[in-house]
Amino acid sequence: MVLRETKPAEPLAFDTDKCIGCNRCLEACQIDIMIPSEEKGSPPLVAFPDECWYCGACVMECPTGAISLQHPLMNQVRWAEKSSLTARSEA
Amino acid sequence: MYQGREWPYPSEIDQTETLTADVLVVGGGIAGCMAAIAAARRGQKVILVDKGAVKRSGAGGTGIDHWESAATNPCSRVTPEELHKAMMDDNDGYNNPISHYIECREGWDRLLDIEQMGGKIRDTEDEFKGAEFRDEETKLLFAYDYHARYTLRVWGTTFKPAMARELKRLGVRVLERVMVTSLLTKDGKHGSDCIGATGFHTRTGKFYIMRAKATIIATSRPARVWLFSAAYPGLCEFRPLQCIGDGHAMGWRIGAEFCMMEKSVRAQFSASGRSYPPYMAGNNHNTWYPATLIDATGREIPYVDRDGNILPDVRSRCYPAKGQRFFLKGGNVEEAKYEYLGPETLPWDKLKEMGYKLPFYADLTAMPEHERKAIWGLMVGQEGKTMVPVYQYLNNAGFDPTKHVIQCYGAGWTSAEFLPQERQLFGAPGGFMNDWYLMTNIPGLFAAGDALFSSNCYGHAAATGYYAGRHAARFAASRSLHDFDAHQLEQERERVYAPLLNKRGFGWKELNHAICKTMQNYCGELKEEGLLLAGAERLSHYEKDIVPYTSASNPHELMRLLEVHNILTVAQMILEACLVRKQDCPPLEFYRADSGGQAPKPFLVIRHDGEKTVCREVPLDFAGDVKENYERRNQDYIEEKEVG
Ligand SMILES: Cc1cc2nc3c(=O)[nH]c(=O)nc-3n(C[C@H](O)[C@H](O)[C@H](O)COP(=O)(O)OP(=O)(O)OC[C@H]3O[C@@H](n4cnc5c(N)ncnc54)[C@H](O)[C@@H]3O)c2cc1C
Ligand code: SF4
Ligand code: SF4
């Protein structure tokens, strides 16, 4: 058993196969939530995940499509197939 | 996870760099960039300082979808004067008459400027050829009122990078990751001329002294005064986390005047709390106008005109009512006065009576294709914070706007209902008082964009930024640099670094939360003298007894903490402003339990004179005849434009 920090959310997920470690994402973030990795060629570390504004600027700047932005679970909106609603009203 | 890890950047805490400029611009968002561009084009040596990185910083860094009040665009059917009058009337005169005239008059010029820099403002690929909202000749696209055509749909994701390139081309010295912490005054005296600013690097801690002949504040508006979440501080408010009113706090400390600081509204957006990410939940406002709404059974919700007549089709949602010249809709105009009221879906009470079932959904499936694509792909996509977090995110999850519908939460575009004490400086809140040059009462200190009182919107920020840049350039040309006061500087250096010396103490989150709780309790929807005074005492306790014991362990955390010190100052200003207004003032959403029932006073402009708050009354029409007063002061610009 170990102690670990429980995070309220993890805004960014990096695909390490795609990432070339250019740090463009880090430089684009106006809130500066990332710090460079100690390993060359690796994605930055998200040092201050709670400060993320979820704007997507880092993703827009990434040349290899290595980042995905993940909203906190509570902010994932619900959507539905329209035909399922009309079916409900007809039932 | 990274607890105990060494700070990755070299420490430069003991280093100082002194820079000089003719014009110093604080804040590299929309207003700041355009201010720097204007001043540089007038041959001034310009420094622009941003806490973030200019290419994508500020509220509009990742884009905008609609540009309001471009009354001089070739297709507009309203004049700047007409539109300006409507904006003033709609707020009973409690609005910034000068800045909004500049917006109406020069907004379109700035859009052309941005186009020249490489921003996309026209449908050059003919994606929307034949659409009702397109002008075939100019290829401009319009939003909301397709008859009046003063608001444009634009490709805002391209704007900020274009401005960043232009700054470089013009040789503006851009300092990024530097937080400006204070304004310097002549001889270090309270209320005297502004002669520059100080700042520090938020990665290395290096100290900056910036000497300038004119300084422009473009740091946007305060936030996190009532709303806080330690788990999701980045989501507490609508605007970027680092925009919390530093400029207001710095200005207040040197004696700058502020107007309308008593205005706050019940919160509309806080995705750490009740609402969803902006533009993600179903709604029919702003970015999503004129989306079709349906109820839980798929039944369409009718749109009505201002007289309650049900509108027959999607097209008619975008035209003024019979006998109406134009309607107001967009960023912060959700419920205009009858004269300017646009089409809207029936209110909830009425729908309930008629048997409509919750939840509702935004339904683009049956809309005309151009309208659907304008909402899903252009507006949702080009709007700030939508390209990745909404458009790509939902597309990747399988959302198809021809098949799927998105749920609405709450009524209107806010996607939530907040409590009365959960307040926010949303819409057009208070800020710096300005004259016709956008200069404050402090000589040499200008303000632009959302830092100005009663301001909002991208076009307004671009127009006022450029205007302030022009006039600051002229001011600078007639001034010389001043030596800073050594005592003022040393005091500031000490204040800035003190939290790094406190190895233990209150962190920024704890203090921010305490301020917010205090404001919710003592300065909620209904104000009262005794409560306000008690709140002020509480805040003064934080200032005297807590702030000296706050601590930070690296320059990034120091930035966050100094921001909260500024939030504390802003909260104090707000209480002072609420204390001087003794009567209800509905246009400012200001209500006092101890109001005596007299008519509301006009603008109550406040400043700190070094010891106490002083207030002066300013008539709502202080700007006089706006066209005449504008033209008298901007002949050179008007002539320049004529020459082309
Ligand atoms: C998600 C979203 C969508 C929007 N969509 C639209 C739209 O479609 N149409 C529209 O008209 N408006 C829109 N707006 C509003 C519009 O973006 C703002 O009104 C506009 O950006 C304000 O410009 P500004 O320059 O005053 O502030 P910002 O553009 O926010 O710039 C402020 C800058 O100041 C910097 N700063 C702050 N403090 C300091 C300091 N101490 N030292 C150094 N730098 C500092 C910040 O880093 C930031 O770069 C939207 C806003 C948001 C958040
Ligand atoms: S989403 Fe925005 S705030 Fe979050 S890390 Fe990326 S750039 Fe920074
Ligand atoms: S921008 Fe993309 S490739 Fe570059 S470091 Fe970030 S994730 Fe890796």
Image: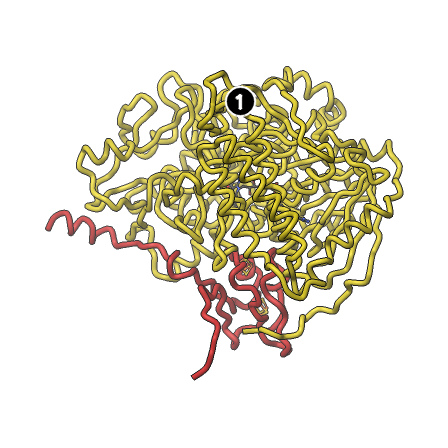
- Above or below for B526 versus B567: above
- Locate residue B455: give its quadrant: top right
Counting labels gives: 1
Quadrant housing the N terminus of chain B: bottom right
Left or right: residue B578 versus residue B26 is left
Quadrant housing the C terminus of chain B: top right
- Under circle 1, the secondary element is helix
Residue at image location 28% in from the left, 52% down from the top: B403
In what quadrant does ligand 3 lie?
A: bottom right
- Above or below for B538 versus B200: above
Residue wearing tag 1: B88
The outermost residue toward the left is: A91
- Above or below for B131 versus A89: above
> Looking at the picture, how far across and down is residue B351, in whole percent?
23, 34
The tint chain B carries is yellow
Compare residues B340 and A8 and report the one nearer the observer: A8
Residue B221 can be seen in this image: no
The tint chain A carries is red
Q: Mark 1 lies on which chain?
A: B
> Looking at the picture, how far across and down is residue B20, in whole percent?
84, 47
Residue at image location 74% in from the left, 24% down from the top: B639
Task: Please name the colour scheme applied to the rendered image.
Answer: by chain
Residue at image location 66% in from the left, 74% down from the top: B6
Compare residues B496 and B332 and report the one nearer the observer: B496
- Above or below for B397 versus B375: below
Compare residues A47 and B320 and report the one nearer the observer: A47
- Locate residue B306: give its quadrant: top left
Compare residues B195 and B114 and report the one nearer the observer: B195
Left or right: residue B273 versus residue B110 is left
> Looking at the picture, how far across and down is residue B541, in whole percent?
61, 46
> Looking at the picture, how far across and down is residue B638, in whole percent?
71, 24
Left or right: residue A77 versus residue A67 is left
